[in-house]
Amino acid sequence: MKRFVYNGQPGRVVFGPGALAQLGKEIQALGARRALVLSTPEQRASAEHVAQILGARAAGVFDRAVMHVPIETAREARELARKLDADCAVAVGGGSTTGLGKAIALDSGLPILAIPTTYAGSEMTPIYGITEGGLKKTGRDAKVLPRTVIYDPELTLTLPVGLSVTSGINAIAHAAEGLYSVDSNPVMDLMAEEGIRALGRALPAIRADARDLEARGDALYGAWLCGIVLGNVGMALHHKLCHTLGGSFNLPHAETHTIVLPHALAYNAKAAPEAMRRIARALDGAGAPQAVFDLAQDNGAPVALRDIGMKAEDLDRACDIALQNQYPNPRPLEREAIRQLLQDAFEGKRPSAG
Ligand SMILES: NC(=O)C1=CN([C@@H]2O[C@H](COP(=O)(O)OP(=O)(O)OC[C@H]3O[C@@H](n4cnc5c(N)ncnc54)[C@H](O)[C@@H]3O)[C@@H](O)[C@H]2O)C=CC1
Ligand SMILES: O=C(O)/C=C\C(=O)CC(=O)O
């Protein structure tokens, strides 16, 4: 008999092509009068478009979001929010931009309205990350959970195919680890399997036609479900390895998730057979690690850490860092086997079945 605790996270979702048109109404519903719009430098035009929709309710645009939220950028954005007397942050972009909004909210309590344009899922979580002195610290705080999320698939049509595939597999990683989480529950399991299924369907269709709006909607739907799982249940070895590789070796976030996931699943396969069965079923494959590997490789994503900047001589240190603290994982953390996992991921081996 299952025993579990289920805690729904508050938050409003407006979903669908053209949903961005609801922005004015949604800001008004939040009671905000002066919104600071956030973006990366590359998405400045999207931020300006959002500011235009907000009209008099736009206080300004800050376009310097970058990956992993450096504390200096967070301080600059917080200062600007104070100077402009902003009462809300609107984050238009991927996990980096939502992350910057969270850093402002953590400090000031300002509500966030998120408009995600990748599949990372940060908009659905109370998890924040800030990097200081080369070290990324993450934490959970209800204050940083966006109050409203507008998912508009039209805004993802410009997401390059390569990043669409790796970002989609980043989302699948949340659901996969959610299925064997120490605090999983039946509702999250349903969302996790459905999220993986939607992304498994959508990514090849996006690869075939990046402007396929139906597939873009499917991918965003999957990302939403996977993001909910990340926000509600604890992650395990895979996320720990990716944070180590991203935080200490500066590897790109979505690509790292894509490469490591098949190997983390292979490591945990025997200890979490029901999770593996559900992942394989969602991807219509014979085995979960192999199905995830094939999804990446068949859609042109990198499959070897050595191809995204990892150095062979750093693998021992990565293994040591990932094992510094104990954390729940279906299979106990065994140094030799985890070092082999990293070697396999480094070389881009397809995990063997059984
Ligand atoms: N706190 C949380 O719950 C989570 C946090 N994250 C964090 O988010 C960051 C990674 O976020 P990602 O979304 O992977 O990447 P990102 O937000 O850094 O975006 C990658 C690049 O793609 C561009 N881009 C985004 N959407 C686009 C679009 N529709 N069209 C064209 N270009 C677009 C961005 O401007 C940027 O240049 C990492 O720092 C990661 O740790 C990721 C997942 C969950
Ligand atoms: O590192 C963070 O900012 C928080 C969580 C994540 O990045 C989740 C992930 O690894 O995709």
Image (spheres, grey):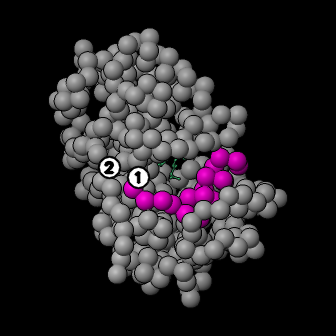
Quadrant, the C terminus? bottom right
User: What residue would you read off at disc 1?
Assistant: 231
**Where residue 51 sits in the image (x, y, percent)?**
31, 22
Q: How many marks?
A: 2
Whole-Å distance between the Cαs marked 2 and 1?
8 Å
**Where residue 120 sits in the image (x, y, percent)?**
44, 50
Give the vertical position of 266 relative to 125 (above or below).
below
Residue at coordinates 70% horizontally, 61% vertically from top-left?
Answer: 323
Q: Is residue 298 visible?
A: no
Q: Are marks 2 and 1 in contact (CB under 8 Å)?
A: yes
Choose between 97 and 229: the one closer to the eye.
229
Q: Is residue 327 visible?
A: yes
User: What residue would you read off at disc 2?
Assistant: 9
Stretch in magenta: 231-249
State the SS at label 2.
loop
Residue at coordinates 44% horizontally, 76% vertically from top-left?
Answer: 275
Choose between 220 and 244: the one closer to the eye.
244
Residue at coordinates 39% horizontally, 56% vertically from top-left?
Answer: 232
Q: Amino acid at mark 2?
A: Gln
